[in-house]
């Protein structure tokens, strides 16, 4: 056994440390119970074989099918799936917690974590500054293009021999007449 297993932290299976928290144990218990309930529902809910097919002369058709068993089966199947999903989530949670626990020598100490976070923050700030610079350049180009288009359009209208109806839309709505 490993030192962690001897210290009461749970068994080790082929290098994978299984940390059995109370949450994982309770989720496993519920999942096993849901599995049993699903098997019992299948056995008890559908014991009879279907009757003869309808339309055969001289054979009395059986009673209509009971759909209550199907509804119970759907509910129990949902509980089964959710219970095993909870086991998967609890197991993943326990593995993550065991990998970042202070008892694990491979984990980072607080100073290393702070340094890593500072590096990530500076990279994010540099990326944000670069994106802001690109966006500012694009907005400046767009403004210059709009200004040039407006000037050229005005010159074109001024040089035409026939007056052109103005296609100007007000930004604000005019007040309603009283």
Image: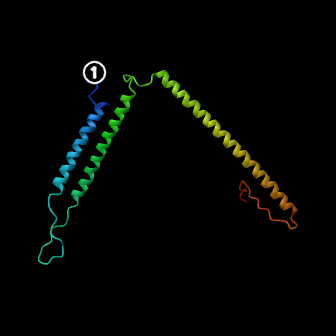
How many discs mark residues in the rendered view? 1
| Residue at horizontal 58 percent and vertical 34 percent from the top | 124
Quadrant for the N terminus, please: top left
Quadrant for the C terminus, please: bottom right
Within the image, what quadrant is residue 174 found in?
Answer: bottom right
| Residue at horizontal 48 percent and vertical 25 percent from the top | 113
Q: Residue furthest front?
A: 14
* Viewer-nearest residue: 54 or 134: 134
Q: Position of residue 53 (x, y in %)?
A: 18, 71
In this picture, residue 49 sits left or right of residue 16: left
In this picture, residue 89 sits left or right of residue 61: right
Within the image, what quadrant is residue 67 found in?
Answer: bottom left
Within the image, what quadrant is residue 62 found in?
Answer: bottom left
Give the residue at mark 1. 7
Q: Residue furthest bottom?
A: 57
Q: Position of residue 103 (x, y in %)?
A: 36, 22
In this rendering, the answer to whether 83 lies above or below 156 is: above
In this rendering, the answer to whether 131 lies above or below 77 is: above
Q: Position of residue 123 (x, y in %)?
A: 58, 32
* Viewer-nearest residue: 150 or 163: 150
Q: What color scheme is it?
A: rainbow
Q: Residues within 10 Å of mark 1 (few under 14, many from 20)?
A: few
Give the SS element for disc 1.
loop
Q: Residue furthest left?
A: 58
Q: Position of residue 166 (x, y in %)?
A: 79, 62
In this rendering, the answer to whether 111 lies above or below 39 is: above
| Residue at horizontal 61 percent and vertical 36 percent from the top | 127
């Amino acid at each position: 056994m490993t030192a962690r297993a001897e210290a009461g932290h749970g068994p080790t299976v082929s290098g994978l440390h299984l940390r059995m928290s109370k949450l994982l144990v309770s989720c496993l218990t519920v999942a096993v119970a849901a599995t049993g309930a699903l098997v019992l529902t299948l056995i008890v809910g559908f014991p009879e074989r279907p009757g003869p097919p309808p339309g055969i002369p001289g054979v009395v058709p059986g009673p209509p099918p009971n759909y209550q068993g199907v509804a119970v089966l759907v509910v129990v199947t949902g509980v089964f799936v959710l219970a095993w999903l909870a086991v998967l989530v609890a197991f993943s949670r326990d593995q993550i917690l065991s990998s970042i626990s202070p008892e694990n020598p491979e984990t980072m100490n607080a100073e290393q974590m702070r340094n890593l976070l500072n590096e990530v923050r500076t990279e994010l700030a540099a990326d944000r500054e670069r994106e802001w610079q690109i966006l500012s350049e694009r907005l400046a180009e767009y403004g210059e293009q709009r200004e040039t288009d407006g000037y050229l359009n005005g010159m074109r209208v001024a040089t035409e021999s026939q007056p052109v109806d103005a296609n100007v839309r007000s930004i604000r709505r005019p007040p309603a007449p009283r």
